[in-house]
Image: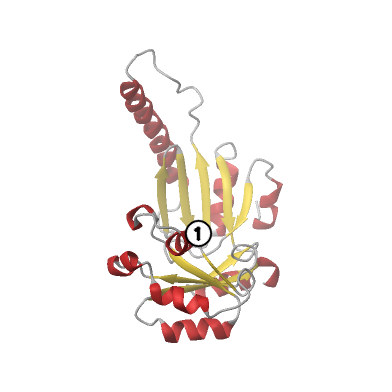
């Protein structure tokens, strides 16, 4: 099966790779082990039923993983991950992906793949680019992440608040993410507010000023590139 025919598999959801997985792989194939016959046990102890059921699910997932390993090429660079009854397979080989789509037609659920060669080049050349169907929050090109150091959290990021107060057009030019909004607009104890502190921006000049102003507080920056732009 050629990569161009992958969309003909009706039960497989096709999505585009946002960034390289583990900084190495452009393909991710998600398969699910069948656990439909693993139901509640006839035992009044909830924790006993959960433990037994969880063990059986793990056995099914490991069994599926072993079957995948039996048919994949040993010298192909790849990686596996198990999450509940799901097995994720990461690789850069479209030939192996095509083979797995054919061999495990009933187990494959989702395929993440590059849109085209330019897509692959973009996420290879810049690890901070995120290839997406839509902009961040459907509006913003850039997402600026800040470090969440304990002292800054206790003071509720006054430097960021002061800078944002100087910017106009909230909602189109800039916007704090939900967690930063809680820090700025509520008095709740900071331990309960979350950890991903970020601001969305659109203007590259605002991004540059932010980089200069918050060198010690800035963590990293992501730029959204739309699939339609590739």
Q: Position of residue 149 (x, y in %)?
A: 31, 68
Q: Is residue 125 visible?
A: no
Give the quarter of the figure containing the C terminus.
bottom right
Residue for point 45% across, 53% down:
73
Q: Position of residue 38 (x, y in %)?
A: 45, 23
Give the total number of marks visible in the rendering.
Answer: 1
Report the coloring of the rendering. Answer: secondary structure
* Dot 1 crowding, Cα within 10 Å, few <14, some 14–19, many 20+: some
Residues 30 and 177: in front is 177
Specify whether 93 is left or right of 60: right
Q: Residue furthest left?
A: 151
Residues 223 and 172: in front is 172
Q: Quadrant of residue 103?
A: top right
Residues 107 and 200: in front is 200
Specify whether 156 is left or right of 115: left
Residues 146 and 116: in front is 146
Residue for point 37% across, 30% down:
54
Q: Position of residue 200 (x, y in %)?
A: 54, 70
Q: Which residue is mark 1?
A: 178
Specify whether 2 is left or right of 54: right
Q: Position of residue 43 (x, y in %)?
A: 35, 14
> Which type of secondary structure does the marked residue at label 1 adopt?
helix
Q: Is residue 27 visible?
A: yes
Q: Quadrant of residue 41?
A: top left
Q: Is residue 14 above or below residue 155?
A: above
């Amino acid at each position: 099966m050629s990569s161009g025919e992958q969309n003909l598999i009706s039960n497989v959801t096709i999505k585009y790779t946002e960034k390289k997985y583990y900084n190495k792989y452009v393909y991710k194939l998600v398969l699910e082990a069948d656990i439909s016959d693993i139901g509640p046990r006839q035992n009044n102890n909830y924790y006993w039923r959960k433990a037994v059921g969880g063990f059986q699910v793990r056995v099914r997932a490991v069994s599926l993983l072993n079957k995948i390993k039996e048919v994949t090429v040993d010298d192909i660079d790849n990686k596996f991950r198990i999450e509940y009854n799901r097995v994720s397979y990461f690789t850069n080989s479209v030939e192996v992906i095509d083979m797995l789509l054919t061999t495990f037609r009933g187990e494959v659920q989702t395929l993440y793949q590059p849109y085209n060669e330019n897509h692959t080049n973009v996420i290879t050349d810049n690890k901070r680019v995120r290839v997406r169907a839509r902009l961040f929050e459907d509006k913003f090109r850039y997402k600026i992440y800040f470090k969440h150091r304990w002292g800054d959290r206790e003071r509720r990021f006054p430097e960021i608040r002061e800078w944002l107060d100087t910017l106009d057009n909230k909602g189109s030019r800039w916007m704090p993410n939900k967690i930063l909004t809680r820090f700025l607009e509520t008095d709740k104890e900071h331990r309960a507010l979350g950890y991903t502190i970020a601001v969305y921006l659109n203007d590259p000049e605002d991004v540059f000023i932010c980089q200069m102003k918050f060198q010690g507080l800035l963590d990293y920056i992501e730029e959204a590139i739309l699939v339609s732009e590739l």
